[in-house]
Amino acid sequence: MWLTVYDTRMTEKNTPLMDELLQIMARLRDKDTGCPWDIEQTFKSIVPCTIEEAYEVADAIDRGDMKHLKEELGDLLLQVVFHSRMAEEEALFCFSDVVDTLNKKLVSRHPHVFGDEVAKNSEEVLKIWQIAKDKEKKSLSEKKSVLDDIPMNFPALMRAQKLSKKAAKVGFEWVQTEDVIDKVIEELNEFRDEINSGNKQKQAEELGDVFFTLVNLSRRLDIECEEAMRSCNAKFYKRFSGMEQEAKSQGKALTDLSLNEWEGFWDMQKAKEKTKEKAA
């Protein structure tokens, strides 16, 4: 009953617009009258665009720019429609199949909403969600590894965190968080030794070990490392651009600043942040 009511309420407003969007995409891909660029694209060629649009959605949210978010969500939807159109041309599936699959997945993974399961909090919901996911996927005996479900093309930090989380679930885990911190120090020392060796390949390998161990520390502390890095990037941008403005106001060129001047401008930006935090 819930699905019938939902469809009746939403279809009148949204179906004509979706139909128009699908028709526009079909026209763009028409081999005789369409857009040359759109016609040339393949699943693989527009992957970078799909990833970029997802990040632009995240950026709009981080900046609290809801007007821009509306536009970026449209751009992300375009990627779904684009892939669906190419699949339809190859008789693989169509946009309706994508939506139908999503609808069924949402219902099957929320038995606490559409079924008899009970979930009192988010933690219980996640457990139910994982059980539902496991039922949908192949058994472990049919996989080469428990890590096979994690896409190769995830951002490196995100993939590292998911890999370590999967491994931890089957027992490959440190006993205490302090053990991870000790491991970070150990990996840093190994990296330092390779710096002295001059072997770039080994240096990159050891630096990767440092990153991966830090990701494990992030996971242990329930911190999303990708989000932490995005926040750090934003903080660096804010401080550095602030230093640029400060130097410009004093008639100084960045390339002429001494190390002490750089440190002075940096400390000034940090002091400004602390003042704002106290005021808030």
Image: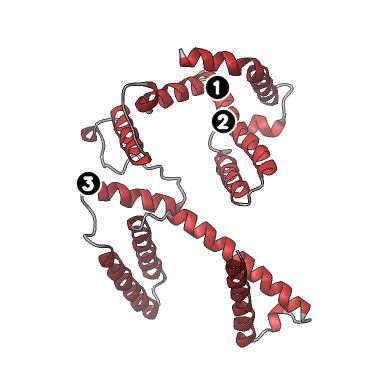
* Of 143 and 224, the residue lying toward us: 224
The x and y percentages for residue 14 are: 64, 20
Q: Residue at x 60, y 42 (%)?
A: 53
* Mark 3 secondary-structure assignment: loop
* Mark 2 secondary-structure assignment: helix
User: Where's the C terminus, which quadrant?
Assistant: bottom right
Can the viewer see residue 82? yes
Amino acid carrying label 3: it is Val
Amino acid carrying label 2: it is Val
Q: Is residue 65 left or right of residue 194?
A: right
Q: CA distance from mark 3 to mark 1?
A: 37 Å
User: Where's the N terminus, which quadrant?
Assistant: top left
Pointer 1: what residue? Answer: 95
The x and y percentages for residue 251 are: 79, 81
Pointer 3: what residue? Answer: 170
Q: Quadrant of residue 11?
A: top right
Pointer 2: what residue? Answer: 80
Q: Of the two numbered discs 3 and 1 on the same chain, state the one appearing first in sequence.
A: 1
Q: Residue at x 40, y 42 (%)?
A: 151
Q: Quadrant of residue 219?
A: bottom left
The x and y percentages for residue 69 are: 64, 41
Q: CA distance from mark 1 to mark 2?
A: 8 Å
